[in-house]
Image (tube, helix red, strand yellow):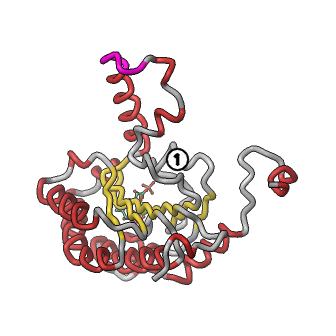
Amino acid sequence: MASTHTRDPGTPRHVAVIMDGNGRWASRRALPRHLGHRAGVKAVRSTVEGCARRGVEALTLFAFSSENWGRPAEEVARLMQLFVEAMEREVEELDRNGIRLRFIGDLGTLKAEVRERIAATEERTASNTRMTLNVALSYGGRWDIARAARRLAERVARGEITPDSVDEASIAAELELAGSPEPDLFIRTGGEQRLSNFLLWSLAYTELYFCDVLWPDFDDDELERACRHFAGRQRRYGLTSEQVARV
Ligand code: IPE
Ligand code: IPE
Ligand code: MG
């Protein structure tokens, strides 16, 4: 079994994915949209396994955005049902493979049934260390930053910290992904080249990879292509390429 110690130097520590294109995958087959979401579960399984095998430490998947609540009620209900079923069906295998699950987002907006399943899934896998799988549900990047700001403001109001101690590190420490390395590689399937309010703060220096393949068709070969793209990038963080080559 691969562990973080076997990670190739060109392998990202943290991969973040916008799983887009399920609806179009279904429409092209004259199927209802919800069957596209169902078909996407296989790609989730393959991506989780593929990342764990490559020694990725954290994988963050965008499953449902704060804006997705505006979709037709039936699609939202089908998605919630699918999340519950997928957690029930997959938790054992994930646990056996050493995957820790965490859910990030405004979870209070979810129905009790979904929240209970989330709590059970997180608890069951809490001690696993091979890879952390963060699932973003009812998540918005702006919501995350606003929440961090509110928490810091509350601490200032209680007199625990002073306003001048609010800096990049203290904001980052209040975000949902606090404690994870920042994503190295961002992948968006489905052809759109936008962030759609995903991890706005943490993606500041992430390498972006967009592909046209629709999410249900994203398999290990596609993941390999994305990882190769990443391995070929020079990350400069504002420096010159000569400076970076020297270190
Ligand atoms: C992504 O696929 C899944 C969710 C947003 C929940 P879409 O449902 O957005 O698929 P397209 O973009 O309509 O094809
Ligand atoms: C982003 O996809 C959200 C998820 C994949 C969960 P959308 O399909 O909602 O994004 P837009 O509407 O094309 O920006
Ligand atoms: Mg979409």
Determine the main secondary structure of the stretch shown in magenta: loop
Image coordinates of residue 129 in percent, x first then y, are 39, 66
Outermost residue toward the left?
112
Residue 150 appears left or right of 235: left
**Pick the front one: 151 or 186:** 151
> Can you say whether 159 is above or below 17 in the image?
above
Image coordinates of residue 59 in percent, x first then y, are 45, 64
Is 159 magenta? The answer is: yes
Residue at mark 1 = 202
Residue labelled 1 has its Cβ within 8 Å of some atom of ligand 2:
no
Which quarter of the picture shows residue 92?
bottom left
Is 169 magenta? The answer is: no
Q: Which residue is drawn at 49% across and 74% down?
A: 3
Q: Which residue is drawn at 51% across and 82% down?
A: 220
Total numbered labels:
1
**Pick the front one: 98 or 212:** 98
**Pick the front one: 41 or 177:** 177
Residue 194 appears left or right of 24: right
Image coordinates of residue 195 in percent, x first then y, are 51, 52
> Can you say whether 56 is above or below 64 in the image?
below
Q: What are the residue bounds of the magenta stretch?
A: 156-161
Q: What element carries label 1?
A: loop
Q: Residue at x 22, y 61 (%)?
A: 123
Q: Which class describes the residues within 10 Å of circle 1: few (<14), some (14-19), or many (20+)?
A: some
Quadrant for the N terminus in the image? bottom left
Which of the four quarters of the rendered structure image does ligand 1 lie in?
bottom left
